[in-house]
Image: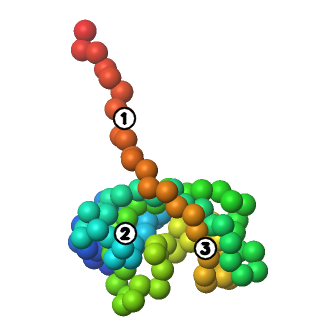
Amino acid sequence: MACMHAATKCNGNRQDQFPAGNLFVSVSKGLWDNGAACGRRYRLKCVSGNRKPCKGGAAIDVRVVDVCKGTPCPATILLSQDAFHSISDPSNTKINIEFTQYEYLSIRPFISSR
C-alpha cells in the first residue's frame, strides 16, 4: 500500500516527488528562494539537542518538496517524520542540525550499440 502525502508547493499531488525512505523536508522562506528550492538536496545530520537525541552522527540525504506552512516557520528546515527518526531519538522534539546543499547527479551507464 502506497503512502499518500498532502499536496506540496513543489509538485502538488505527485507521489514520485517523495524520495525513497520518505527522507524529505520543507524549508523556511529564507531557503525557499521563491520556489527555486524545489528538488534541492541537502545532506544533514543531528549535532545536538536536549538529552542527547542524536543517533550516532550519521548523515542522511533529503530532498526539498515544500515550503514551511507555519507563520512564522518554527525551523529553517522541517524534516519528515521518517527523516527525523533516522537521525534523532523520537522522544525529543527539537534538535540542532548541520546541513549542506549538494548537487545530485544521476549517472546513467554508457552502453555501446556496437
Pinpoint residue 27: horizontal percent, then vertical percent: 39, 73
**Residue type highlighted by circle 3:** Asn
Helix, strand or loop at mark 2: helix
Three-letter amino acid code at the position of disc 2: Leu
Query: Distance of mark 1 from mark 2, alpha carbons?
Result: 27 Å
Asked if residue 37 shows in the view, the reply is yes
Ranked by sequence position, the earlier of labels 1 and 3 is: 3
Residue at (34, 84) in percent of width and height? 69
Nearer the viewer's eye, disc 1 or disc 2? 2
Using residue 13 as the reference point, say whether residue 78 is left or right of it.
Answer: right
Nearer the observer, 112 or 3: 112
What residue does disc 2 label? 31
- Relative depth, front residue between 4 and 105: 105
Tell me which label, 1 or 2, sits earlier in the chain: 2
Q: Residue furthest right?
A: 51
Q: Is residue 110 above or below residue 69?
A: above
Q: Which residue is mark 1?
A: 107
Q: Secondary structure beneath disc 1?
A: loop
